[in-house]
């Protein structure tokens, strides 16, 4: 993230605020919630970090033995953690009601909002961590698996000597370049065309709706088609076993992302972005219940949405707005959030298949991300630009989760 | 077109006719019709609502005041406002396939032409509608120039063909309806950065080695490009033909001349966060009201050189719409986007209490409109709860009526100011209650301005009571608060300790009360209970009765016996714990947990036969109800604050009993000495008085006593006893009273800066509302003295104006710590510097000539 200092600053500020500053939840609880959230994606890097923090802030070591050892109150959060991580659209006001209902283990609304913000933050951060390849290698021999912070080599070189590596690879294999250069040119061409053509071509409304549906449906095939090639099924199961030490923080580990579109039945309506936006609704609610975090998140979302260097790989002075918007909206699309004012045809034109696979994996099953996926898209682009993509994905995901959770809370309140 | 109009007038007249009939027959009806003379015509109606099929996003009224259009994501209809009801007149959503062009974010009805409407669609299309079209589809023109959602459309108030739109993409467009596309486009980006082009660019200067090139690029491009901000509202000025105002997501408001699209005339930051709405004053030329996400409505005077904030109303939720009330110069109506469903009408000169409140809606109100531009009594509103309402001003609830008209405040030196209605004070002052306490009652009377609207309410009198030096000393309160022990020791000890404290402070009655409490609750036992249990214990050797008999030991000191019993019933394991430990074990366990009581366990056992006096004083069991060991965190680390789960008592004991090592040892003991229980039983009962009454007998009396103290003003006593006795009396006093006592006591404690004590009280309270107090944020933002925005990062320098907010008038450096300032001239500085300065001079160090006072 240090490649994007402006963003880093606002990221750190909000993270610091939600972990260390005034808030309704006690410090060790915050870290434990972070652990729970990261565990949903088996992100041992984050878990390790927060296990340390948890103990340092005075958390009870026994809790680390798993969910059975924590107070019922924290355990109750599990359900919402699970939904939020994988299928946030399923969160209803009933879930909220169950948590805040007066009783022995109830949550107050400020506490709940704090917890939700933490959960969303860490789900999204797990996406970023896997997307950027920051994950310690799992060592099955060490049973507790928490102590090693040996970082996977690919990320180290990637992030540390960004440009050198890039140059090396550029000079190294010549034949790839021609290919990817033309790829890049084509992409820029498409962006340009999109900007110019907007006035000429006016898609009918049905067309727009179908485009959204198509994108939604297509996102379904994107991974189910591709990942199963790169990951034989047995691999996943191995994964499950190896990371069983992580799964102690979660229940129902089999619960995963299910395509928004796949559920076929149209019971669950598309989330209309205009009806519940972060700027108008989410912010007010968050800020009311957990003061100041709204401003910090607001700043962060704005920052990431507007961050640009106007470059694309080797080209300068490029307006990347359309591209960034396509990335952001594509993530929201996978979570069933639709923007009326967006033509989802753009997604199709701008985001190539390998990128879509990458996006889907990073946002929905981050634990399955591989270096191959990371490398396979946008071969011309700098690593800093790919990190930029990761940032966009992370924030888009966080916002999507927050929107669903906050909408449920709003409904509970009214 | 004309046809529709005629029909309307028909019904209109008819309703007028109906009204006159109605009035004579039913004059007392609450929701009576109101007739307002408006230059020959009149409006009639009542408070009413009708159900829509879908949530509304916006409403707009036809200029004839007889029709209203409602628009939303899946609704677009025109309703006639009749006398008794809304009647659906026209559904503009025609066609089989729902189109996004019909998903309206905003709607506006032309104020010159009854046939002309415009809608803003969420997909960025601006549509105009001509009701005069003969076909079923009234759609007229389609403008697809905006790239993002259009938030607002607005017709020119006097020009028939001019339409303005503001969109999420940061552009405002002006359309001439006679042409196919926009006449001019206004860009919302900041004029300096955006138009400076290549000349003015910011470069971040960082050490070049840390971040190679990317950093530089960020600074340059972001600012050079000038991000266009989303437009939230656009409004033509009613008075100035060429002027319109636009509000932005970043808090800015811009003023434009319609003829000059290249740059805005004026720009200023009005709110922190998005400005959702604005409205020009219908009469005052320069007044613009803006409402923002920061929960404020501000009224700006635009006639002056710099936009000047003339009024500010603080609401409780983000402000989604604001509309000036016709014919009432200082009134405006607001509604909120989140959480709050009510519509408020404010008098901007009285920004704290809304003048009127409409509470009809069950979900957020999305659109409000005054029915007629010259009638202040009818307000229409649409809501997400799918209803359309007409509110009558006379039916509104008035929060002022519910407000407490008296005010009371302490001054820095203990002076007391009291403001109340004049009539009330007049009778009061005739009575002269405490001649001694009231040395110089000073009376102020506010001079009334007959032009002001609240004359009736505002005629209040303020009296100030000065404190007589020495007389009102509250040192006893402070001493008591600091020295009382509220928890952490057995009840008897607490009572004794507190009695001693009270006695030393010369408060004998209080001391006596504590002693009596000890006698009531800490005597060795209850005759009745003992004999009962004794016999039962003998009758059966195990199970419930036995356990009961053991509980005797608990009951003896008079705990809430039911809870104990329940607990033991619930878990047999804990029964055994209680059972066998009669000898030594339970006392041992308790001793370990009870802080401050380190009595050897054997000692206790020995005493059972000996002096019973000692037994109940030392028996740690007695301390249980205070549950010091449960309240304090068991872990060795300091929690920032505990999670307020539940009253922690019973559950914890359960946990204890369940946790393996405790129950293990307990179980052993039980098997070893099964007879112990009966043994101790007998011995105890032998030692007891047979004539004692159970503490429950006194509880009513104790509660009365607490109320007595509270009413006397000694809420300290009430709360202290409440905490010390815990479960024993808590159930007998209703929650609200307890809460009230707690808040008053905490308030008092904080007034005397007894933060630690107040925190302890908060912690020990079992009331949810009270223990929540500890969870509130303790951050306090200081606002910048220049731009009046909170300074979030550091307390002394404003990020926005890049100025240091508080400079010391003596040394001219920034004050980062304590800042002291004169309330007369508002100059100040470092505490030490000011103190020093004022020792030598009585004039303000800033040289303003004010004679500052420092005390």
Image (cartoon, rainbow, N blue to C red):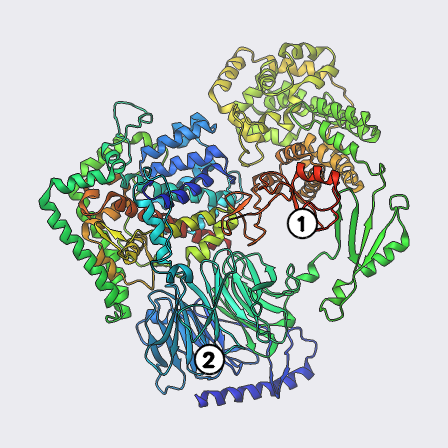
Q: In which quarter of the image is the C terminus of chain B?
A: top right
Say which element carries label 1.
loop
**Above or below: residue B278 compared with residue B110:** above
Q: Which of A361 and B652 is in front in this view?
A: A361
Would residue A86 be seen by someone viewing this image from the given angle? no
Q: Which of B613 and B288 is in front in this view?
A: B288
* Left or right position of B53 against B821: left
* Left or right position of B776 against B146: right
* Left or right position of B255 against B137: right
Say which element carries label 2.
loop
Q: Which of A55 and A163 is in front in this view?
A: A163
On the image, numbered disc 2 is attached to which residue?
B110
* Left or right position of B366 against B586: left
Task: Residue B826: give its label.
Answer: 1
**Above or below: residue B464 compared with residue B66:** above
Which numbered mark, 2 or 1, is in the foreground of this view?
1
């Amino acid at each position: 993230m240090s490649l994007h200092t402006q963003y880093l600053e606002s990221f750190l500020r909000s993270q610091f605020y939600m972990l260390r500053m005034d808030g309704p939840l006690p410090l060790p609880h915050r870290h434990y919630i972070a652990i729970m959230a990261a565990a949903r994606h088996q992100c041992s890097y984050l878990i390790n970090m927060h296990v340390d923090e948890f103990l340092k802030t005075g958390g009870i070591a026994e809790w680390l033995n798993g969910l059975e050892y924590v107070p019922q109150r924290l355990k109750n959060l599990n359900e919402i953690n699970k939904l939020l991580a994988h299928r946030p659209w399923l969160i209803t006001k009933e879930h909220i009601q169950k948590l805040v209902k007066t009783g022995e283990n109830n949550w107050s609304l400020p506490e709940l909002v704090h917890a939700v913000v933490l959960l969303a933050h860490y789900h999204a951060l797990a996406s970023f961590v896997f997307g950027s390849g920051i994950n310690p290698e799992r060592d099955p021999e060490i049973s507790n698996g928490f102590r090693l912070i040996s970082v996977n080599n690919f990320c180290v070189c990637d992030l540390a000597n960004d440009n050198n590596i890039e140059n090396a690879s550029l000079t190294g294999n010549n034949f790839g370049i021609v290919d990817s250069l033309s790829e890049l040119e084509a992409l820029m061409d498409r962006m340009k065309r999109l900007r110019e053509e907007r006035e000429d071509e006016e898609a009918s409304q049905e067309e727009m709706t179908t485009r959204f549906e198509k994108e939604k449906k297509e996102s379904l095939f994107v991974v189910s088609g591709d990942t199963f090639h790169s990951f034989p099924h047995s691999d996943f199961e191995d994964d499950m076993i190896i990371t069983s030490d992580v799964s102690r923080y979660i229940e129902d580990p089999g619960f995963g992302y299910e395509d928004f579109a796949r559920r076929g039945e149209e019971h669950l309506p598309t989330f209309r972005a205009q009806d519940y936006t972060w700027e108008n609704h989410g912010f007010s609610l968050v800020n009311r219940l957990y003061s100041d975090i709204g401003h910090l998140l607001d700043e962060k979302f704005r920052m990431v949405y507007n961050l640009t260097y106007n470059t694309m790989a080797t080209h300068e002075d490029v307006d990347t707005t359309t591209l960034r918007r396509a990335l952001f909206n594509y993530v929201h699309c996978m979570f069933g959030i639709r923007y009326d004012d967006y033509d989802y045809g753009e997604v199709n034109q701008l985001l190539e298949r390998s990128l879509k696979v990458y996006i889907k994996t990073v946002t929905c099953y981050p634990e399955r991300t591989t270096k191959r996926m990371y490398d396979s898209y946008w071969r011309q682009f700098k690593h800093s630009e790919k990190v930029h993509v990761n940032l966009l994905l992370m924030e888009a995901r966080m916002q999507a989760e927050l929107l669903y959770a906050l909408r449920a809370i709003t409904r509970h309140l009214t | 077109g004309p046809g529709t109009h005629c029909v309307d007038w028909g019904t209109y007249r008819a309703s007028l006719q109906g009204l006159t009939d109605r009035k004579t027959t039913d004059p007392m009806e609450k929701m009576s019709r109101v007739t307002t003379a408006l230059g020959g015509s009149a409006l009639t109606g009542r408070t009413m609502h009708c159900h829509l099929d879908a949530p509304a996003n916006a409403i707009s009224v036809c200029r004839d005041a007889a029709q209203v259009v409602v628009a939303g994501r899946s609704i677009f209809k025109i309703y006639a406002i009749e006398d008794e009801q809304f009647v659906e007149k026209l559904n503009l959503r025609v066609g089989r396939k729902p189109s996004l062009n019909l998903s309206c974010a905003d709607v506006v009805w032309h104020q010159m032409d009854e046939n002309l409407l415009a809608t803003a669609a969420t997909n960025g299309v601006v549509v105009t509608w001509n009701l005069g079209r003969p076909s079923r589809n009234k759609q007229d023109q389609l403008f697809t120039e905006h790239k993002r959602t259009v938030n607002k459309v607005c017709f020119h108030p006097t020009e028939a063909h001019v339409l303005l739109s503001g969109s999420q993409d940061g552009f405002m467009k002006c359309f001439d309806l006679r042409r196919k596309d926009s006449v001019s486009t206004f860009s919302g980006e900041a004029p300096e950065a955006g138009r400076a082009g290549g000349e003015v660019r910011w470069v971040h200067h960082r050490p070049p080695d840390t971040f190679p090139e990317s950093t530089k690029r960020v600074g340059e491009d972001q600012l050079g490009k000038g991000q266009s901000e989303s437009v939230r509202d656009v409004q033509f000025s009613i008075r100035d033909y060429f002027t319109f105002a636009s509000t932005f997501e970043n808090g800015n408001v811009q003023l434009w001349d319609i003829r000059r699209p290249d740059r805005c005339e004026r720009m200023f930051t009005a709110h922190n966060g998005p400005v959702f709405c604005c409205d020009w004053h219908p009469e005052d030329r320069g007044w613009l009201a803006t409402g923002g996400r920061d929960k404020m409505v501000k009224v700006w005077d635009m006639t002056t050189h710099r936009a000047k904030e003339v009024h500010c109303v603080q609401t409780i939720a983000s402000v989604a719409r604001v509309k000036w009330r016709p014919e009432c110069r200082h009134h405006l109506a607001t509604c909120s986007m989140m959480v709050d469903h009510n519509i408020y009408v404010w008098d901007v000169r009285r920004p704290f209490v809304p003048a009127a409140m409409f509470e009809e809606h069950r979900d957020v109100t999305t659109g409000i409109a005054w029915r007629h531009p010259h009638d202040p009594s009818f307000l229409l509103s649409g809501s997400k709860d799918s209803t359309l309402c007409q509110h009558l001003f006379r039916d509104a609830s008035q929060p002022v009526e519910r407000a407490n008209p008296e005010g009371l405040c302490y001054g820095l030196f203990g002076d007391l100011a009291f403001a109340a209605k004049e009539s009330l004070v007049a009778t009061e002052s005739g009575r002269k209650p405490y001649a001694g306490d009231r040395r110089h009652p000073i009376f102020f009377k506010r001079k009334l301005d007959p032009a002001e609207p609240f004359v009736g309410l505002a005629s209040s009198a303020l009296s100030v009571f000065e404190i007589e030096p020495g007389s009102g000393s509250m040192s006893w309160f402070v001493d008591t608060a600091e020295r009382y022990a509220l928890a952490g020791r057995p009840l008897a000890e607490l009572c004794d300790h507190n009695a001693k404290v009270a006695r030393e402070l010369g408060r004998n009655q209080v001391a006596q009360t504590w002693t009596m409490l000890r006698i009531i609750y800490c005597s060795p036992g209850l005759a009745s209970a003992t004999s009962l249990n004794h016999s039962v214990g003998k009758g059966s050797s195990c199970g419930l009765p036995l356990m009961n008999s053991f509980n005797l030991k608990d009951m003896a000191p008079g705990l809430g016996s039911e809870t104990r019993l329940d607990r033991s019933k619930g878990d047999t394991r804990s029964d055994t714990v209680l059972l066998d430990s009669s000898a030594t074990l339970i006392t041992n366990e308790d001793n370990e947990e009870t802080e401050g009581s380190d009595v050897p366990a054997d000692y206790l056992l020995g005493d059972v036969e000996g002096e019973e006096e000692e037994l109940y004083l030392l028996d740690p069991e007695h301390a249980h109800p205070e549950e010091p060991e449960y309240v304090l965190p068991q872990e060795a680390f300091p929690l920032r604050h505990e999670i307020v789960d539940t009253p922690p008592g019973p559950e914890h004991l359960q946990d204890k009993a369940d946790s393996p090592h405790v129950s293990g040892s307990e179980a052993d003991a039980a098997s070893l000495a099964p007879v112990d229980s009966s043994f101790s039983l007998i011995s105890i009962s032998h030692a007891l008085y047979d004539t004692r009454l159970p503490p429950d007998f006194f509880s009513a009396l104790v509660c009365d006593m607490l109320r007595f103290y509270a009413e006397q003003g000694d809420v300290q006593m009430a709360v202290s006893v409440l905490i010390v006795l815990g479960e024993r009396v808590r159930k007998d006093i209703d929650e609200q009273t307890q809460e009230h006592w707690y808040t008053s006591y905490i308030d008092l404690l904080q007034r005397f800066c007894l933060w630690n004590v107040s925190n302890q009280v908060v912690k020990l309270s079992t009331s949810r509302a009270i223990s929540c107090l500890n969870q509130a944020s303790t951050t306090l933002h200081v606002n910048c003295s220049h731009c009046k925005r909170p300074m979030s990062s550091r307390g002394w320098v404003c990020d926005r104006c890049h100025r240091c907010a508080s400079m010391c008038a003596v040394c001219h450096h920034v004050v980062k710590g304590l800042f002291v300032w004169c309330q007369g001239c508002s100059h100040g500085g470092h505490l030490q510097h000011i103190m020093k300065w004022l020792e030598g001079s009585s004039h303000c160090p800033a040289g303003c000539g004010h004679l500052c006072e420092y005390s």
